[in-house]
Amino acid sequence: MANPKDILVITTSSAEGLKIKKHLKPVSAHIVAGTNLFSDFLGGLTDVFGGRSSSYQKQLSSLYNEAIERIKYNAHEIGGNCVIGLNIDMDEISGKGKSMFMLTAIGTAVIIEKDEKLNSLSNANEKFENVGVERINNLRLKKSIIEKAEKRELYYNDETWSFITSNQVQEVFPGILRAHSNTIENFESMQDAYTLFNKNFISYIDALEENKKVSLLYEKIETETNHQVALYLSKIIKELNLFDYEKNMSLLKNSDFKKQKIGLRIATYDKSFYDKEDIENLNQTKTFIAETFKERGEISTKKQLLSSKEKEVWNCECGNKSIEIGEYCGSCKNDIFGFKESEMKPTEIMKYIDQKIELINEYIK
């Protein structure tokens, strides 16, 4: 199975159409969250009705969903395509005047032969015979938030971040970047604002479906004209282990050299899991880098001072000429390959990929 997100998770040990080929082993996922996770929502108790808090319930649902996603990944890692007998418990851990919630999900990873009837067990777009008022109100608020984001009128406070994260509102993704581009560009002088935004944005992206977050990030990097924003999105890919071979090859083949450089950075990033196909893809990435990233400057010769002998120099694409081989251009600060001293060079990246392949081969059959 190529995608952990496709793993079926059920609470029972069997279901109609479920044919278990092999039981693997128990899998679990653990999430520890500080009680302050709920404090911002419960402080005013403004959303409590009938002894219940909708914000509290949404946060609990978010934790449960995260636990299920993690247990899918753990099952995928050992070759399973289904988790049966799912059980989720939440406990409170206290000590030294502090307390935390620990959520534990346990199930059994198995390999199944899928039946078409199973599709009905996890149909996210299923229509209902009736719908509760809470769903209607939730959809109304979602549409309002999307509209405000498009008009650049959305205020990104804690409540907004919580809603768009727990409800996976991917439509506001472009608006988020527009609203916070100044914070991203000036992160050094706006450290507090950047830290808060970065925390919220990572949580927002991580809550999206796997294929959605990958598509949004890579496609935005390809089209984004603000280089700092594009670089920032590449950092999110690194943070969340979202390396994607095909998407990154598109970046490496981009006509814009700056985009290609971002693709090179991403080529060193990780996926959550690797298989034999990834080894082949990494080798192809390495070959492409070797064949593509050649000298951008033109090598020529010049006579040495007080000597009739000539030595090799290179002329930079920025117009600066007669630069010593191995030296950086005094004008644009690039080397003959177009890279600055602080940037990873293609040769270094290929060595890194070689090392990764070697490490993966130690585990893959």
Image (cartoon, helix red, strand yellow):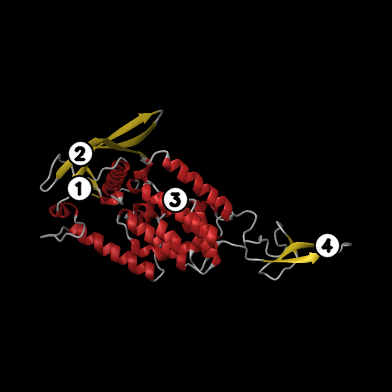
Q: Quarter of the image for the C terminus: give it.
A: top left
335 to the left or right of 177: right
Q: Disc 2 versus disc 1: distance between alpha carbons? A: 47 Å
Q: Which of marks 2 and 3 is in front?
A: 2
- Kindly indicate whether the residue at mark 4 contacts the one at mark 3 (C-beta within 8 angstroms): no
Viewer-proximal residue, 271 or 155? 271
Amino acid type at image mark 4: Lys
Q: Is residue 70 depicted above or below 119 in this figure?
A: above
Q: Disc 4 versus disc 1: distance between alpha carbons? A: 92 Å
Amino acid type at image mark 1: Gly
Question: What secondary structure is marked by label 2?
Answer: strand
Question: What secondary structure is marked by label 3?
Answer: helix
Q: Disc 2 versus disc 3: distance between alpha carbons? A: 40 Å
Q: Nearer the viewer, mark 3 or mark 4?
A: 4
Q: Which residue is drawn at 46% across and 66% down?
A: 222
Q: Name the residue under label 3.
A: 199
Q: Is residue 226 visible?
A: yes
Q: Residue at x 31, y 55 (%)?
A: 209
Task: Give the percent coordinates (x, y) of residue 201.
Answer: 42, 55
Q: Disc 3 versus disc 1: distance between alpha carbons? A: 33 Å
Q: Mark 4 points at which residue?
A: 309
Disc 3 or 4, which lies upstream in sequence? Answer: 3
Q: Is residue 221 depicted above or below 110 in this figure?
A: below
Viewer-proximal residue, 122 or 77? 77
Question: What secondary structure is marked by label 1?
Answer: loop
Task: Give the percent coordinates (x, y) of residue 230.
Answer: 49, 62
Q: Name the residue under label 1.
A: 50
